[in-house]
Amino acid sequence: MKNSDSKIYKIVSNSILICIIIAAFIVIFDEDYTNDFIGWFLIIVFWTVKSIINYRINIKKGNTKIAMADLLLVGIALSFLITRVI
C-alpha cells in the first residue's frame, strides 16, 4: 500500500509540474508580448512547487541540510512572488 501511494504521489506531482511548465512556455512564446509576465510568474510557481516536493522527499530520506536549502528556495520564490504581485 505504501509503494502504491508513493507512485500515485509521483504521478500527480509530475503531472502538475508538467502542466505548469507547458502553460508557462505557451504564454511566454505566444505573439502577445504583454502577457510574458504571466509566463515568468508560472515559471517561478513551477520552481516553488518543485522545491516543496524536493523538500518533502529530502525530509523523508533524512537529508536535513538539503531540505533546508529547498525550504530557503521556497522562501525566496514566495517572497519574489509576493513582492511582484502586490
Image (cartoon, grey):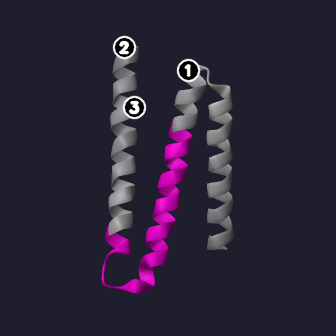
Q: Which residues are magenta?
A: 26-53
Instruction: Tell me the residue that label 1 is attached to.
Output: 61
Q: What type is the residue that disc 1 sits on?
A: Lys
Q: Position of residue 50 (x, y in %)?
A: 49, 45
Asked if the residue under mark 3 is in contact with the one under mark 1, i.e. CB atoms within 8 Å, the reply is no
Say if 61 sits above or below 72 in the image: above
Residue at position x 63%, y 33% from top?
A: 67
Q: Is residue 67 left or right of residue 21?
A: right
Say if 86 sits above or below 73 in the image: below
Is disc 1 placed on a helix, strand or loop?
helix
Q: What type is the residue that disc 2 sits on?
A: Met
Sequence order check, earlier mark of 2 and 1: 2
Q: Position of residue 15 (x, y in %)?
A: 33, 45
Residue at position x 68%, y 45% from top?
A: 72
Say if 80 sits above or below 54 in the image: below
Residue at position x 67%, y 27% from top?
A: 64
Give the distance between the C-alpha atoms of the residues marked 1 and 3, in whole angstroms: 16 Å
Instruction: Tell me the residue that label 3 is attached to.
Output: 9
The quarter of the rendered structure image containing the N terminus is: top left
> Which residue occupies the foreground of this view, 8 or 71?
71
Is disc 2 placed on a helix, strand or loop?
loop
Q: Residue 1, labelled with which disc?
A: 2
The image shows a total of numbered marks equal to 3
Sequence order check, earlier mark of 1 and 3: 3
User: Callout 3 environment at 10 Å: few (<14), some (14 to 19), or many (20+)?
Assistant: few
User: Callout 2 environment at 10 Å: few (<14), some (14 to 19), or many (20+)?
Assistant: few
Q: Is residue 12 left or right of residue 71?
A: left
Indicate whether residue 68 is drawn in magenta.
no
Q: Position of residue 4 (x, y in %)?
A: 34, 20
Residue at position x 55%, y 51% from top?
A: 48
